[in-house]
Image: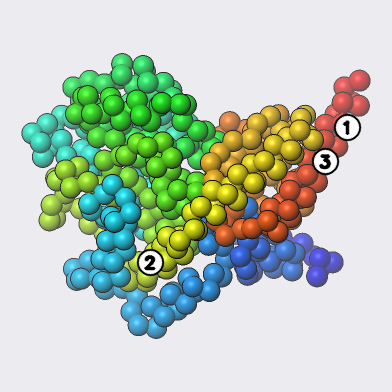
Amino acid sequence: MADQAPSQAPTDSAILPTYARAPVAFERGDGAWLTATDGTRYLDFGAGIAVCCLGHGHPHLVNALTEQAQKLWHVSNLFQIPQAERLAKRLVEKTFADYVFFTNSGAEALEGAIKTARKYHAASGHPEKFHLITFEGAFHGRTLATIAAGGNPKYIEGFGPKVQGFDQAPWGDLEAVKALIGPQTAGVLVEPIQGEGGVRLPPAGFLRGLRDLCDQYGLLLVMDEVQSGVGRTGKFFAHEIYGVTPDIMSIAKGIGGGFPLGAFLATREAGKGMVVGTHGTTYGGNPLATACGNAVLDVILEDGFLERVAHTGLLMKQRLAQLQDAHPRVIAEVRGEGLFLGIRLHTPNGEFAVAAREEQMLVIPALDNVVRLLPPLIIGETEIDEAMERLDRACVRVERTLAASDKVAS
Ligand SMILES: *Cc1c(COP(=O)(O)O)cnc(C)c1O
């Protein structure tokens, strides 16, 4: 099969060219494996950017989706939706939250979370408090408000006036956060572990410090767990690792297991402004999406599943440390929690991702010259062994280009 012509990127695509896509298309998936249209099999350690948490074609998810698809897809939020009620109850039981609002994506979950934080203060008689403190390297989505929250100039420029109300502090800098708190501050918006920013872990005491500042100044702590949540770190949500609880939280990616689904969660107090008519969505939380969400939770919340993710993550991290020892000119650092892992490189991360792809393994570049490893949470030692062999060969490829440029230089 590998002797067939490799997948080609269409040169006449009618899709708006906002992505520099790799020249490969996939036809089917099974667990952590993807099969391209030319028959080549790839080990998928990207999982559709931390989305396919149960891998591809998980029988329980496929069953849940097809069963619901036979019955009913969509009814709108003008009616009761038992599948959504059940999923919300389960999320509330397992978290700090009292309420859930379902969305179709991460950015919408953030929009809702931001609106909820602002509305809380308006409902408390302080409509002037609408600013959220955010962090350098953050990513919160691509809507007008979430690009302003993320603060990356590349995403903001040319799209008109930046949405007001986001003040940015350096990552991990509690003093800077304190200095930004003013009469307009509504809260702090933070990813407990930055994803697009390069799998950047919070410095010791940082999240606890944010919680304390929020409590001291009457602010809301909003956590964006769109990437870090739903078992990715070996905990249901990453903030559990740090023993720090938010007032509002956005989730998405893993919760649908590949079906577009997101949500924001809030405590009763933080959600007090969000009464009838204040917010809405046509699709959000429809029967098909929430049937998938429930199926994801059936597996993630099974006894021992999260412990297994944590264990697999540790194993993977140990193996990656060995890889770093073997390839010190390529790998600068290995970091992360559970199966939310990053390799910081000495060499360009884009080149490394291509080298890995040439070894039939998918990884995902991030800021800080990192490639992310976000495998399906169901992987075991077989996939880890495969991954390590492929990553080792990718490192060798990169070293060969280094050796070639050494020669040119000397
Ligand atoms: C992916 C991501 C988002 C945006 O989610 P979309 O579904 O692409 O809108 C927001 N926040 C974080 C932390 C993310 O990783």
Q: Amino acid at mark 3?
A: Val
Q: Pointer 3 and pointer 2: residues touching (CB < 8 Å)? A: no
Q: Earlier in the sequence, mark 3 or mark 1?
A: 3
Tag nearer the camera, 3 or 1:
3
**Compared with residue 48, is residue 56 higher up or lower down, i.e. above or below?**
below
**Compared with residue 224, is residue 59 higher up or lower down, i.e. above or below?**
below
Q: Residue at x 14, y 45 (%)?
A: 273
Q: CA distance from mark 3 to mark 1?
A: 12 Å
Asked whether residue 153 appears in the rendered view, the answer is no
On the image, which quarter does residue 168 sit in?
top left
342 vs 74, nearest the viewer:
342
Q: Earlier in the sequence, mark 2 or mark 1?
A: 2
Could you tell me which secondary element the residue under label 3 belongs to? helix
The percent position of residue 288, horizontal first and vertical second, equals 37, 71
Residue where numbered disc 2 is placed: 294
Could you tell me which secondary element the residue under label 1 belongs to? helix
On the image, which quarter does residue 34 sit in?
bottom right
In the picture, the disc for residue 306 is none
In the image as oriented, which residue stretches furthest toward the left?
125
The C terminus, quarter of image: top right
Q: Amino acid at mark 1?
A: Ala
In the picture, the disc for residue 396 is 3
Residue where numbered disc 1 is placed: 404
**Compared with residue 110, is residue 3 higher up or lower down, i.e. above or below?**
below
Q: Residue at x 23, y 39 (%)?
A: 117
The percent position of residue 257, horizontal first and vertical second, equals 47, 62
Q: Earlier in the sequence, mark 3 or mark 2?
A: 2
Q: Residue at x 77, y 62 (%)?
A: 6
Q: Pointer 2 and pointer 1: residues touching (CB < 8 Å)? A: no
